[in-house]
Image: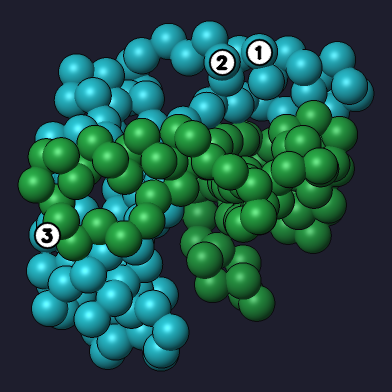
Chain colours: A cyan, B green
Amino acid sequence: MRFSSEVVVTLRPSINDPQGLVVHDGLRQLGFTGVRSARVGKYIELEVEAADEASAQAVVTQMCEKLLRNPVIEDYRITVRPLGGAPSSGSPT
Amino acid sequence: MRFSSEVVVTLRPSINDPQGLVVHDGLRQLGFTGVRSARVGKYIELEVEAADEASAQAVVTQMCEKLLRNPVIEDYRITVRPLGGAPSSGSPT
């Protein structure tokens, strides 16, 4: 069964984010004075083959641990949903 | 009122994604044979001051149109939620 997984990798809150500062300053210079902070991360969209949603979640977690995030400075979060069908019960999104 | 907004900027499906190919190949070389595709995008977390959720959504849309995404090759999507409180009615996430 095929699953679509979204991985968001963000810098830990204590880590400086120069890219986010550039975005923040750029937005303010464009007149968006309401912006209070901006932080930039990575977004990775994966399609994986797995027996069920739990194993898809497990395998994507392994991918994050082994390749996608730098454990020293980054956090990650994962969402998994079946492709081409309604989300399975217990995980409405 | 302060809102937290998440912006995901992705390459349009028709656009080549060399970074995604590298992730895909890297994962396969690590033994993740179940991975079928990988695409990499940007994730931007913003805090904005706005009168209500609708204006926060509108201002973040303007930020995307003016700075955050390249309209030739990228799409974007936005979620907005109030900071430090329950999500307002009508927009449960």
Query: Is residue A11 rendered to the left or right of residue B78?
Result: left
What number is the disc on residue B86? none
**Are discs 1 and 2 both within one chain?**
yes
SS class, disc 2: helix
What number is the disc on residue A19? 2
Q: Earlier in the sequence, mark 2 or mark 3?
A: 2
Measure the C-alpha gap from mark 2 to mark 3.
Answer: 31 Å
Query: Is residue B15 rendered to the left or right of residue A69?
Result: right
Residue at 36 percent of width and 34 percent of height? B22
Which subunit holds the residue at mark 2?
A
Give the residue type at disc 1. Val
Give the residue type at disc 2. Gln
Crowd class of label 2 (few under 14; some 14 to 19; many from 20; radius 10 Å): few
Q: Position of residue A82 (x, y in %)?
A: 33, 79
Q: Which residue is mark 1?
A: A22
Q: Which residue is mark 3?
A: A58
Nearest to the observer: residue A52 or residue B44: A52
Give the residue type at disc 3. Ala
Which subunit holds the residue at mark 3?
A
Residue at 24 percent of width and 36 percent of height? B26
Q: Is residue A64 above or below residue A48?
A: above
Which subunit holds the residue at mark 1?
A
SS class, disc 1: helix
Nearest to the observer: residue B61 or residue B20: B20
Query: Are discs 1 and 2 less than 8 Å apart at CB?
Result: yes
- Residue B90: image quadrant is bottom right
**Are discs 1 and 3 both within one chain?**
yes
Residue at 56 percent of width and 15 percent of height? A19
Q: Earlier in the sequence, mark 1 or mark 3?
A: 1
